[in-house]
Image: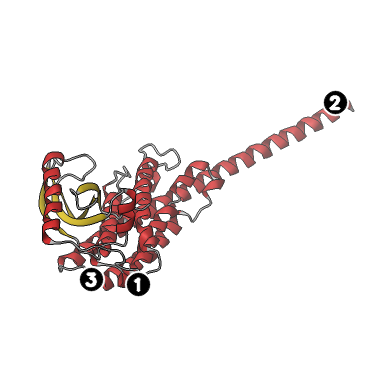
Amino acid sequence: MERKSSKLIISILLLLLILSLICSWTLFKKTVAMHYAADKAIGYGLKGLSHEMNCTLASLSELKAYGALEPEKFSLLCKQLDRDVFYSVETMAAFDYGLLSAGYNDYDIFWFYCYINDVFRASENFDKMSTAEIQSVYMSLSKVCSAFNQLDWHLPKSDNYFGISLEAYDFEKDPSGVRKHLEELKALTAKEQEMLQVYLQPRTDDNVGKNVPEHTQEEIASAIDVIKKEFESKWQGCTLKEIYYAGGGVSRQYQDWADRNNADDVIVLLSSFEAGSDADPSLNPNSTYDNYMWILVRTDGGEWIHVDHGYYIPLL
């Protein structure tokens, strides 16, 4: 009797062991399939975004090729891009990566869509913005699109339509550092997104150009001379092609710049320059920078002092 009971227990244990092995194998296969699906979503999403960024760069270049930037066409481009990027980001977020592993959450790039959406929202204010401010949004979008396509994703190539072999790259282990490249892009877009905030505020005819000074030709010439001298001494590897007065309507931030620098007068210049192969690493080598802003301040009619520059309007 005891022997029969022992055999029964052993049989039950063996059955449980077999069922456990079957369940483990089934769960393993399901996890592998889910990882593959996640890799597929990430791969298609990145390639789709890359294609959209390339198309956007071409469209931006075409807009500028006709001379003055046309706000209406630029705004339509921003609206289309906002919709397209949203769909690509949704593709990448189509799976609950948290069920697979924490690592997949790093590829949820909703933050990138948030930047593109802010560009679109800023474009809705173009009718209340100066030409230089619209150019600033244009340059920001151009910079981010270029950065996206310049990142070395190390994604394996294949002959399929999307140019990527999804089976050949494991996004969970990420051997080529795609996650790192996304972090670099995230840092850039965060900086550009901060710049855009000033354009997202409600605009009225009363607050555009308020407290904006005008300057004489002599004052403008002296400010330009300051930047030319600094350019020659500190911007090695770069060639200044053009520099001019931005005009009184370039920004609503004049008082902010003055207050932060304990000054009572501000002037903004715009320039165009070429960065050579030996230029500062922060610049893209062999590139042309247009509509580059230079901010100078002074007190009691004294000498102009250069306090800031770049494709942005500094915020408090």
Q: Check the picture and name the quadrant holding the N terminus.
A: top right
Q: Nearer the viewer, residue 182 or 18?
A: 182
Residue type at mark 3? Answer: Glu
Cα distance, mark 2 to mark 3?
92 Å
Is residue 99 rendered to the left or right of residue 247? Answer: right
Front residue of this view, candidates 152 and 217: 217
Q: Which residue has dot 3 on it?
A: 70
Give percent across and percent down for residue 103.
48, 41
Mark positioned earlier in the residue sequence (2 or 3): 2
Using the image as rendered, state which of residue 20 and residue 192 is in the foreground: 192
* Residue under numbered circle 1: 206
Residue 47 seen by the camera: no
Residue extending farthest to the right is: 1
Q: How many marks?
A: 3
Q: Is residue 199 above or below residue 31?
A: below
Tell me: 66 left or right of 101: left
Where is residue 242 drawn, in percent x and y?
A: 11, 55
